[in-house]
Image (spheres, helix red, strand yellow):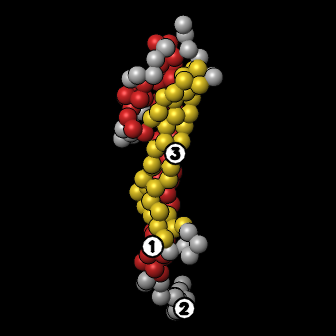
Amino acid sequence: MIKLTTHAKTPNNAGTVALEYGLVLPIMIGLMLGVIDISRLMWTFTSLNRAVEASARWGGIRNTTSGVAERAMQEAWGINASAGDFTASIQSCGLQVSANYAFEFLIPWPTGSSGLENHNSIQLTASACYPLIE
């Protein structure tokens, strides 16, 4: 039996995998860091809302504003909030607790009119009101 062999030239793909890897890797790392940053932002916002709700309830049951900011700081799990980030006041709805927290991003997000300024923080605000128990 005669075996016919053809010597067709195969294309040289020696560097294509490295080139594709070099092009795709920065995009994938950027997406991964973006997802992590947005997840941290959502966690912080949820924790801040939970902290003001729990501390407003705590102060409303005790019918006092003293110690509410410290209680809110303890209730803010997973974030480095200070007592100065929280304010408590008596309003028509009852005891209102408000929070104003500066969230720091891990990666710089270009913003501004020129697009060249990098702002790594955003102000998060939360507020809750609980009726006073007498």
Q: Residue at x 46, y 17 (%)?
A: 64
Q: What crowding class fits label 2: few (fewer than 14 Cα within 10 Å), some (14-19), or many (20 or more)? A: few
* Circle 3: residue type: Leu
Residue beneath disc 1: 21
Q: Residue furthest top?
A: 134
Q: Amino acid type of disc 1?
A: Tyr
The residue tagged 2 is: 8
Of tags 3 and 2, which is closer to the observer?
Answer: 3
Closer to the observer: label 1 or label 3?
Answer: 3
Q: Residues within 10 Å of mark 1 (few under 14, many from 20)?
A: few
Q: Position of residue 30 (x, y in %)?
A: 47, 64
Nearer the N terminus, badge 3 or badge 2? 2
Q: CA distance from mark 2 to mark 1?
A: 28 Å
Percent x, y of residue 77: 40, 33
From the viewer's perspective, is the residue at label 2 or at label 1 nearer? 1
Mark 3 vs mark 2, CA separation in Å = 65 Å
The answer to which quarter of the image holds residue 66 is top left
Residue linked to disc 3: 124
Would residue 15 appear left or right of 134 to someone viewing this image? left
Depicted 124 relative to depicted 64: above or below:
below
